[in-house]
Image (spheres, rainbow, N blue to C red):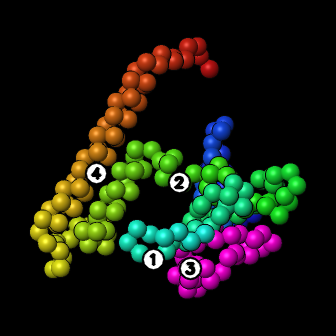
Amino acid sequence: MDELDIRSFWRRGAKAFTDDFLSVDVRKLAREYGLRPNSEAFILAGNVTVNLEWRPCHLGGYRVFFRCPRCLERCCILYRAPAGVYRAPAGDEQLRGYGCKKCLNLAHPVENEGELTRALRRYNRAATRRGDEDPAQPQGKPLWMRWPTWRRLTSQVADTVMERFEYDEKMNQRLRKLYKAQPSRRRTGSL
């Protein structure tokens, strides 16, 4: 992904989205490659060496973290920015573009959503959990689901639909006010 998505730069000081960059998740690496505590001390990401840190958990076992090559903080996900977008610190050309979310000043797309988009996402999630393949065509309760769960999810779907209607009504009222506030323009004269 050497090209940035324009939606992340719609205003001055806006952050780029994490979805726009390639990422490496250390938890996924630990699962897929069977990393064990103190088995490997580093990972080579292109020409950058990234150290791993193993931390003990309270109830036993270990949790693995990357050490961010820029700020040396613990992080689970490292991002690679396109060439030329993020400058490396002076003297460290090998760090070009690799870093954690904080170092690269990134944001998740959810952080930039409006209330309408959040309501739509809640509606789709509740309808999917309820067992509806098509949220527009609700079906009956699935056999495996308990009645209290079914009622709660149905209530959530109804609440999000009502939120959407209220939002639409609020926007319609604002548009009506704007339309009434504009002076009428009459054409005078003949052709």
Q: CA distance from mark 2 to mark 1?
A: 33 Å
Q: Amino acid at mark 4?
A: Thr
Residue 95 position, x and y percent, is 79, 61
Q: Residue at x 68, y 58 (%)?
A: 72
Name which of mark 3 and mark 2 comes first in the sequence: 3
Q: Which residue is mark 2?
A: 109
Q: CA distance from mark 4 to mark 3?
A: 46 Å
Q: Which residue is mark 4?
A: 160
What segment carries the magenta color? 23-52
Q: Residue at x 38, y 23 (%)?
A: 177
Badge 2 element: helix
Quick one: 170 or 8, which is closer to the camera?
8
Looking at the image, is mark 3 or mark 2 nearer the viewer? 3
Label 4 with label 1: CB-CB less than 8 Å: no
Name which of mark 3 and mark 1 comes first in the sequence: 3
Q: Which residue is mark 1?
A: 61
Q: Which residue is mark 3?
A: 37
Q: CA distance from mark 3 to mark 1?
A: 9 Å
Q: Amino acid at mark 2?
A: Pro
Q: Residue at x 88, y 55 (%)?
A: 91
Badge 3 element: loop
Q: CA distance from mark 3 to mark 2?
A: 33 Å
Q: Residue furthest right?
A: 91
* Quadrant of the rendered image containing residue 168: top left
Name which of mark 4 and mark 3 comes first in the sequence: 3
Badge 4 element: helix
Quick one: 8 or 62, which is closer to the camera?
62
